Amino acid sequence: MIDAFQRSAEAVGATIKRFISVTEGVSYIRDLAAGAPISASFLPQEIREAFTETSFAHPDDAADARLCVSFAKAGIAATGSLLLELADPRERGATALPLLHAVFVKGSTIVADLYALHEIIACELNSPKSAYLSLTTGPSRTADIERVLTIGVHGPKELHVLVLEGV
Amino acid sequence: MGRATIKKKIHDTFLRRALKNFAAAYPVARAKAFEGIDFEGLRGRISDTKKAGLKELPELVSRFKSRAEQAGATVHVCATPEDANRTILGIIREKGADFLIKSKAMTSEEIELNPYLEKKGIRCLETDLGEWIIQLAGERPSHMVMPAIHKNKEEVAELFSRATGHECPPDIPSLVWTAREALRSGFLTGQVGLSGANAAMADTGTLAIITNEGNGRLVTTLPRTHIALVGVEKIVPSLTEALDVISVLPKNATGQKITSYVSFIKGPTGEGRELHIVLLDNGRLKLAADPDFSEALKCVKCGACANVCPIYEIVGGHVFGHIYVGGIGLVLTPFFHGFDKAEDILKLCIGCKKCNEVCAAKIDIEGLIVDLRDRIRKPVGQKFLFGTMMKNRRLFHATLRTLYLAQKPFQSAGGRIRHLPLILDSETKFRTLPPIAEKPFRDIVAERPGTGDQGPGTRKSNSKLKTQNSKLEKVLFYTGCLADFVYPDMCRDAKESLEKLGYEVIFPQEQTCCGIPARYSGEMAVAKDMARINTDVLLAEEANYVATICPTCTMSLKHDFQKLLEGDEAFREKARKLADKVFNFSELAARKIGNEGQWPEIGSMAVRDVVTYHDACHLKRGCGVHEEPRKVLRELAGVEIREMADCDKCCGFGGSYSIKYPEISQEVLKNKLENIKASGAQTVAVDCPGCKLQTEGGLEAAGSSVKVEHSATLVARRLRQTK
């Protein structure tokens, strides 16, 4: 499943890195940011804690961050997509504004196709709370000028997917 | 549609190249995106759920409204564009705002929101790259998904230079970067954001928005107030149906498996935020209840009908459509914008049905266009032509015979018509025309007494032949007018082939025009009369089959008659009975393949002529027949088929279309001739006299030696050699 996910995601211009441990992923992200401000949307505790020496940008300053770190609830092998739960608009802005977006996803949460996500999405939509889910596939793109595919128009120019294998 | 506008688009070199490249690239990307996916199953489900939803659209609207409001959104149902514009202005003013940032919404184009708001002092900023380009140019989209496909990078660079105040080079990546930087401050300062939506789920009040650039997420995230302007037909019962729309749309629109972003939005998210959902009716609820045209609302707005349309490829969306463009745009325009806006564009469809083949919601787009022509004003003289002349077979056929004499002065050596007088000439010289035959097939048949060919009424019985033929399956031969009066040899070849293959063939003399020209011209009443006349003629004599050699007639007899006569108690059953018997020549011929031992030499022939096969639109898509003709050519005509690119794309004939719009017809033909030439074959096999007339005339006018032959002629030739 992870192999299929990797193929699909790479086909749409995402960079895929497979890691056994969170700390490896963290150092990869630090290298990517190269000292520039990093913002973050929701991260599970074990991932947030691994960013020991990183202080994330204040949510209101997301526009100034170079990179955003996120965590996907699930992935889709057929399309290389990631499902992000982003009900907090500040977290959403954090994922949409910077040039680089790095997303952790657990290998075990990758499903075959869009339809296999039905239950997870329905569960979010059926809860009494408001919801905003973003299915993200590759970097932002356009072909609006002469149909020439150009990467990175309003959203991130690079999407790095950090697949955590074995979890 | 003004002739001048059409000509201008035809001569717009950039537009032509852009659309042609896209037309070539799209099918490849689309096929790849649908790899491993059952497209027919998927669109069947979408069609079924949309259809069911339209039946209960008012209920779906109220269910969606109450669920979305439970989730904290404010829902405004707006009956008219004025209502919607006023409502949106009200929301913006209530927020004390004067700046609206927008992501792509065709509904906003539909209600002409920007000009309305600008007049009221609200600044609007389109942030979808394509929409921004056309906003700067002061134009409207020429494609639903790629709004600025008609603009080249030089034009974009000029627009961006003017907008940003600094020189922008015509380099695409740098132009895209300019747009990112220029629009960024808009995102950060926009007070209210407006989006459309691709699906709205009634059970949870959720919106789904499909985008690529990321502007949609910013528009629905950064401003504290989000307005979604959504057509009521976008409401589906639940997530299950929405996932089908999300699955099909990007694949069909741009050949992407999925877009970069799909967002599911339920209620306002975040402290003090507001979500206003403006549900736009604008004729939709009325259309949903229309027994004949509600189907149009199944549309998911993927734009695929434009992507494959041979006419769109020539003239683009500023001609082929109004605000909504492409095939479905032609259908929706009269309902959303009025029949006056639709009159001209409805005539632009050539009837090739290519759109039907790819439609994500399985809409009979071409059928709806043709049916809508009944509701528009007809040209002067058309009533006489169809109402009086076509309905009277004797008068109609006498007129055709007179034309044989009238054409004489224009015939050149070999009999073909190369020049027509005065104004007609410049419009028609792209192809030479075959003359009307001195003797139509019907006369040739009548002059051969004793063959049992004259049909009921005039037929003299021949008892010897009858006994001999009593075991044979009996075929009534319906030639169609074009073959009868212009290509009698083609008719003879078909009859002879079918006889040699083991059928008894009879030509009923009372047969007349199938009614398609009347139907395509919006004369539905005449078309119904023609259907009744022919149904009676073809059922008068007991027979196993009715054979045709013109796909348009086949489609008409087999499918259209049933539809036309559905409401006619006396004819409904008869039309069904006839439909069961009607087959194209190649289908009947193919049934005799495998009568082992009959023509062993054909099967084992080592040297075969090479032909390329052109699929007639109405045979492939009108009747679903495309394998049998190839089988017949290989196994009965003994030829090798070398397929050309786009073998099933229209040749540009379209019956009277090529006379009404010769400038478009010849451009469509040019594409076909290029593909024929590239195949290297010296013969084009067709199953349609119309396709033969068009391609043969085009090849001849271009000085090509390539021949065009009906399958029946190729089969007859081979059978004559072998028997």
Image (cartoon, rainbow, N blue to C red):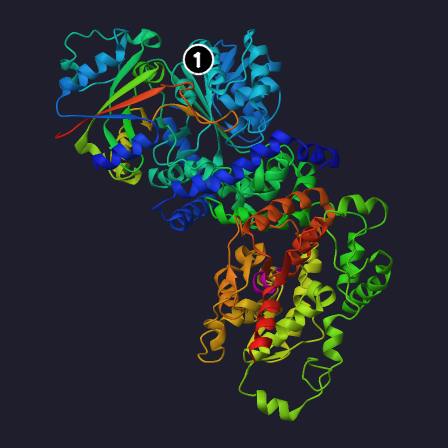
Q: Is residue B321 magenta?
A: no
Q: Position of residue B50 (x, y in %)?
A: 44, 44
On screen, residue B530 versus residue A18, left or right, reads: right
- Horizontal side of residue B224 vs B119, given as left or right: left
Tell which of B306 and B570 is nearer to you: B306
Residue placed at 82% from the left, 58% from the top?
A: B411
Quadrant placement of the C terminus of chain B: bottom right
Query: In the rendering, at what x and y percent does residue B658 appear?
Result: 70, 49
Residue stretch rendered in magenta on the structure = B552-560
Quick check: B371 left or right of A130?
A: right
What amino acid is labelled 1 in the image?
Phe
Locate residue B518: give its quadrant.
bottom right
Of B268 and B214, nearer the camera is B214
Q: Of B550 and B387, which appears nearest the observer?
A: B550
The residue under label 1 is B187
- Where disc 1 sits, the SS reads helix
Q: Is residue B556 magenta?
A: yes
Q: Tell me, yes or no, if residue B327 can be seen here.
A: yes
- Classify B599 as above or below B42: below
Viewer can see residue A76:
no
